[in-house]
């Protein structure tokens, strides 16, 4: 079956909001787009992500096996629920799980693929402003930006990771002509 294209229209960018373990919803949305409108994913000039949404954005950019990503997230959620304190239990380290997954999923030339296309939302420590990082010098920088975007104080630890003086996340709802895939509302602007 032939898929309709967006001929005559500018390609739409994609935006994935923060959603924690519920990013599984976003993975499902990407799977649906792959089945029903792959042109949107293929032609997206930019893919934005904040927090767990940055992982889904990275999966789109790097063409990661979504079933494998889904399994890692489900396994982490199951592991977090094994104790009464869940992810706050001292032996549970979400950032370690995340870094191990990124090391396995990201190609060695991740920085070359991601630069200019993957936009990771972070909060600058110096003034609390949101910035979008899209220029990466190495695979490690891509990993660090994604880790910083996913960091949640107390939940992931007490000392936030940094990427060039930046930490944390926010949404990228101010981006024009973007399909925004959020947990409770999805819209095309």
Image (cartoon, helix red, strand yellow):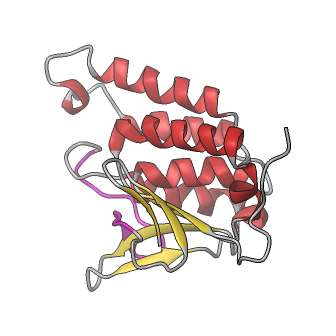
Q: Can residue 119 be seen in the rendering of this structure?
A: yes
Is residue 3 found left or right of 133 in the rendered image? right
Q: Nearer the viewer, residue 115 or 108?
A: 115
Tell me where residue 77 sits by quadrant. top left
* Image x and y of residue 173, in percent: 39, 72
* Image x and y of residue 155, in percent: 23, 42
* Image x and y of residue 176, in percent: 50, 80
Q: What kind of secondary structure does the magenta stretch mostly adopt?
A: loop
Query: Residue at coordinates 15% horizontally, 24% vertically from top-left?
Result: 85
Q: Where does the magenta region start and end?
A: 157-171
Tell me where residue 78 sits by quadrant. top left
Query: Residue at coordinates 76% horizontally, 57% vertically from top-left?
Result: 42
Query: Residue at coordinates 49% horizontally, 76% vertically from top-left?
Result: 132
Query: Residue at coordinates 53% horizontally, 36% vertically from top-left?
Result: 28
* Image x and y of residue 104, in percent: 67, 36
In the rendered image, the residue lying farthest to the left is 84
Tell me where residue 6 sits by quadrant. bottom right
In the rendered image, the residue lying farthest to the top is 82
Q: Is residue 133 above or below residue 145?
A: below
């Amino acid at each position: 079956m032939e898929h309709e294209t967006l001929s005559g229209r500018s390609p739409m960018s994609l935006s994935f909001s923060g959603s924690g373990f519920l990013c599984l919803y976003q993975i499902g949305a990407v799977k649906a787009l792959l089945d029903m409108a792959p042109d949107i994913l293929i032609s997206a000039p930019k893919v934005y992500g904040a927090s767990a949404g940055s992982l889904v954005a990275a999966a789109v950019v790097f063409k990661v096996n979504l079933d494998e990503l889904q399994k890692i997230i489900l396994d982490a959620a199951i592991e977090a629920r094994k104790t009464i304190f869940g992810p706050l239990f001292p032996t549970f380290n979400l950032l370690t799980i995340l870094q191990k997954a990124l090391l396995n999923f990201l190609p060695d030339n991740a920085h070359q693929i991601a630069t200019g296309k993957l936009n990771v939302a972070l909060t600058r420590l110096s003034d609390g402003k949101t910035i979008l990082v899209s220029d990466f010098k190495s695979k490690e920088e891509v990993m660090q930006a994604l880790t910083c975007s996913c960091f949640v104080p107390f939940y992931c630890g007490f000392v936030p990771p940094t990427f060039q003086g930046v930490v944390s996340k926010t949404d990228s709802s101010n981006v024009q002509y973007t399909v925004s895939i959020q947990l409770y509302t999805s819209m095309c602007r």
